[in-house]
């Protein structure tokens, strides 16, 4: 083929999947520099997200060893799923003892806290990782909330770790502590929490560039669920919505997920059904309701991990199995997971070249 | 495929013909609306707009051969007709697939250079996709050969790079 100018070569390469690009770093020094460039990583990710025929989403499971599954390729009984699992080992040199906590997932980076002592920002697609400094210690008794997000204007990745004390209630104001890590500055700083009566918890989910958490709003003697968002540039919290009325704290176990930019709430009604609701401009639409009888094997309750492109739901069952649920056909399919630990969490990530290390490209320049 | 626009056409520009002169000196007659899809021709026509008779205008395209132009012109013409109608993206995609499916690797390269020079971005977009598809699952050696790229790593440097991500070299197609 005739020699192509560099900008067309870059355009062609931006359409390739991550695995091909890692291989093609060996083609030549100019290719190595291009593929290692952080601007190229952004272009490639944007291109991959806009290509609806491709598939860049995988699920990372905090099993031992860690594994990644191409869940879109998981068939409904056609036997095509033999090659969808990749064993990832562990980021860096350290083998964790017994625990991996997911802190967040954004643009191909995943933040995991191993054994509550080793916090790592990791790209499972390139397997490049970076150990983060530890945040200042939190008090003992309380609930935590975490998240990883991208500050577009500062071009910076931020990790959020927050704590709300469970000691003290009613008129006594509780102790809160929020710390934000900036990848660019490689340091943590403390910011103010925003509300005395909303307790947020769990994993923050990204929608339209903001992190969202589920919170419990204390209103006199009532406790209702609320959704709180966090602006990664301004570093400010805002209360954005309440949940559908019948989901209240006395009857439900709830978790929050995103589906692209859509926010979905998954709740176990304890009266025998599971539901998923989608937030659309502050109002709610029910996606499905499944009777608990359909999960005879369950000891506890399922959690929602994500969604396939064609609208199937990916659930985690008791931290031991993955379950695919198709609302259209009302069918389930179980996927047994090998794990040396008793329980796993799952998080969706996108395949990308985005690096947790700020300057990687200079090597062969 | 024959054009069926004669009865419904009310645009006079589509009737007018312009002459394009290729790098190898051939003159090709095209509808003005097709010529306007080519950036250098568009610029040339704007600069020479005082010329009363379009038929007399000859636009030089010194970077594109007659062989490539005669592939490009019917493509652009039909693509214009398709995008003028409220057709589904699927139809355009099928048309693009049909156009690109049988292109040799060499022709693919020539068309990319021409589409780039002529500023036909929708074609360049499609051709980049096709090229990406053709190299996606291939080996490093195949890609160097395919795109005519010189390996400037020492064997030691290349071995070191390969050792950094051995998994990326698994499951590669035969060259």
Image (cartoon, coloured by chain):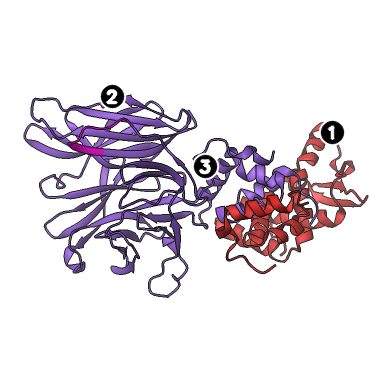
Task: Say left or right for A128 vs A312.
Answer: right
- The N terminus of chain A lies in which quarter of the figure? bottom right
Residue drawn 10% across the image and 25% down it: A172
Front-most of residues B41 and A103: A103
Does residue B122 sit above or below A73 in this rendering? Answer: above
Say whether residue A14 is left or right of residue A5. left
| Magenta stretch bounds | A136-144
Does the magenta-highlighted stretch encompass residue A41?
A: no
Can residue A218 be seen at all in this image of the molecule? Answer: yes
Parent chain of label 3:
A
SS label for mark 1: loop
Per the image, the residue denoted by label 2 is: A192
Q: Residue furthest right?
A: B25
Q: Position of residue B63 (x, y in %)?
A: 85, 46
Q: Who is closer to the viewer here, A52 or A139?
A: A139
Asked if labels 1 and 2 share a chain, the reply is no
- How far apart are labels 3 and 1 at the CA level? 51 Å
Residue B117 falls in image quadrant = top right
The answer to whether mark 1 and mark 2 are in CB contact below 8 A is no
Q: CA distance from mark 2 to mark 3?
A: 29 Å
Q: Secondary structure at mark 3?
A: loop
The label number, if any, that marks residue A355 in the structure image: 3
Q: Position of residue A98 (x, y in %)?
A: 30, 53
Please tell me the numbered disc located at residue B48: 1
Of labels 2 and 3, the one closer to you? 3
């Amino acid at each position: 083929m005739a020699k192509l100018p560099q900008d067309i070569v870059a355009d062609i390469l931006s359409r390739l999947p991550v695995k091909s690009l890692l291989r093609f770093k060996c083609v030549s020094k100019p290719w190595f520099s291009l593929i290692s460039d952080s601007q190229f990583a952004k272009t490639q990710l944007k291109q991959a997200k806009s290509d609806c025929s491709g598939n860049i989403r995988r699920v990372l499971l905090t099993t031992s060893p860690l594994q990644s599954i191409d869940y879109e390729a998981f068939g409904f009984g056609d036997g095509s799923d033999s090659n969808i699992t990749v064993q990832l080992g562990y980021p860096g040199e350290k083998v964790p003892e017994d625990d991996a906590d997911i802190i967040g997932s954004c643009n191909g980076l995943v933040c995991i806290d191993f054994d509550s002592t080793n916090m790592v920002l990791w790209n499972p697609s390139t397997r490049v990782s970076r150990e983060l400094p530890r945040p200042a210690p939190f008090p003992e008794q309380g609930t935590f909330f975490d998240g990883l997000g991208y500050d577009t204007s500062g071009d910076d990745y931020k990790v959020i770790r927050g704590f709300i004390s469970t000691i003290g209630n009613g008129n006594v104001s509780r102790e809160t502590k929020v710390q934000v890590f900036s990848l660019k500055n490689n340091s943590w700083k403390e910011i103010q929490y925003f509300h005395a009566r909303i307790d947020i918890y769990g994993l923050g989910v990204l929608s339209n560039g903001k992190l969202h958490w589920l919170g419990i709003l204390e209103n006199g003697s009532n406790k209702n669920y609320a959704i709180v968002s966090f602006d990664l540039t301004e570093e400010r919290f805002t209360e954005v919505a309440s949940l559908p009325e019948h989901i209240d704290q006395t009857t439900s176990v709830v978790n929050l997920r995103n589906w692209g930019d859509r926010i979905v709430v998954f709740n176990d009604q304890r009266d025998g059904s599971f539901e998923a609701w989608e937030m659309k401009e502050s109002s709610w639409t029910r996606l499905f309701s499944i009777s608990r009888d359909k999960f005879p094997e369950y000891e506890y309750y399922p959690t929602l991990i994500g969604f396939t492109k064609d609208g199937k739901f990916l659930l985690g069952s008791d931290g031991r199995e993955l379950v695919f649920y198709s609302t259209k056909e009302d069918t389930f399919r179980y996927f047994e997971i090998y794990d040396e630990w008793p329980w796993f969490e799952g998080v969706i990530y996108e395949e990308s070249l985005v690096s947790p290390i700020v300057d990687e490209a200079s090597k062969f320049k | 495929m024959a054009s069926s626009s004669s009865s419904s056409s009310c645009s006079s520009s589509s009737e007018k013909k312009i002459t394009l002169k290729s790098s190898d000196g051939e003159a090709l007659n095209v509808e003005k609306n097709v010529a306007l899809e080519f950036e250098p021709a568009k610029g040339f026509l704007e600069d020479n707009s005082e010329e009363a008779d379009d038929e007399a205008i000859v636009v030089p395209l010194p970077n594109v051969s007659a062989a490539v132009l005669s592939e490009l012109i019917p493509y652009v013409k039909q693509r214009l007709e398709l995008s003028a109608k409220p057709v589904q993206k699927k139809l355009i995609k099928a048309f693009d697939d049909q156009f690109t499916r049988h292109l040799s690797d060499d022709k693919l390269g020539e068309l990319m250079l021409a589409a780039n020079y002529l500023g036909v971005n929708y074609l360049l977009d499609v051709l980049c996709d096709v090229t990406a598809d053709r190299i996606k699952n291939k080996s490093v050696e195949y890609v160097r050969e395919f795109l005519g790229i010189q390996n400037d790593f020492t064997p030691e440097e290349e071995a070191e790079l390969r050792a950094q991500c051995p998994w990326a070299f698994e499951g590669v197609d035969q060259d």
